[in-house]
Amino acid sequence: MSKIENRLAELGLELPPVPTPAANFLTCRRAGSLLFLSGQGPRTAGGKVSVGRLGRDCSVERGYADARQIGLQILATLKHVLGSLDGVERVVKIFGMVNAEPGFTDHPQVINGCSDLLVEVLGDKGRHARSAVGMSSLPAGMTVEIEAIVLVAEEY
């Protein structure tokens, strides 16, 4: 078991199944030592997407939990692609999109769910640059969508 997988176990966290693309695109594309992960929405263990608009249907706490779930999905995708989470050299950037009402302004607090999870699991390797923005809608009505750019260790 890798160091990162041991850390997940210590935290009592399990990686979910890797999402499959909903259309003609890849969930992840490698370019040299960088991995570009397509945007993902929060899914339950049964694969159902969490839907709603922040500031109308959903609280910041629910958005945070959904963004945290996406963080686990990002880690699952990385493990699938690299074979081990120890291949992650550094999370470079995440781009978080929040399905929000026009007056909603707590986008960063929602995306903190993913940021906090990545740092909790990966330590300093999980610290990243990021954007957190509001959208008038997201695919399938999902609450949050997050994409990531990750630097891969040389030996991977």
Image: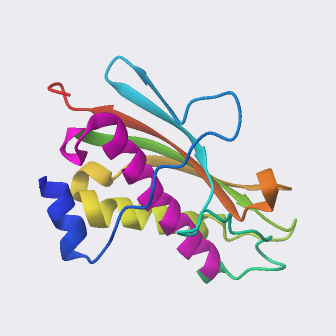
The answer to if 16 sits in the magenta stretch is: no
Number of residue marks: 0
User: Can I make out residue 88 in this image?
Assistant: yes
Q: Quadrant of the N terminus?
A: bottom left
Looking at this view, name the residue that lies furthest to the top: 32
Locate the C terminus and report the quarter of the image it occupies: top left
Residue 60's image quarter?
bottom right
Q: Examine the image and state in which quarter residue 20 appears.
A: top right
Q: Residue furthest front?
A: 46
Q: Relative to residue 115, is residue 132 drawn left or right?
A: right
Q: Position of residue 12 (x, y in %)?
A: 27, 78
**Place of residue 68 in the rendered image (x, y in percent of width and height, measured from the top left):** 48, 67
Q: Residue at x 62, y 39 (%)?
A: 21
> Could you tell me which residue is drawn at 24 percent across and 47 percent down?
85
Please give left or right for residue 118 compared with residue 38 in the image: left
Query: Is most of the magenta stretch helix, strand or loop?
Result: helix
Q: Provide residue 104's location: percent of width, then percent of height.
A: 78, 71
Q: How is the image coloured?
A: rainbow
Q: Percent x, y for residue 67?
A: 55, 65
Q: Is the residue 91 above or below the residue 24 in the image? A: below
Asked whether residue 112 appears in the rendered view, the answer is: no
Closer to the camera, 136 or 26?
A: 26
Relative vertical location of residue 99 with respect to residue 36 in this rendering, above or below? below
Tell whether position 81 is magenta.
Answer: yes
User: Left or right: 104 with respect to 71?
Assistant: right
- Which residue does the image show at 63% across and 73% down from the upper left? 63
Magenta residues?
A: 62-87
Q: Residue placed at 43% from the left, 61% from the top?
A: 16
21, 112: nearer the viewer? 21
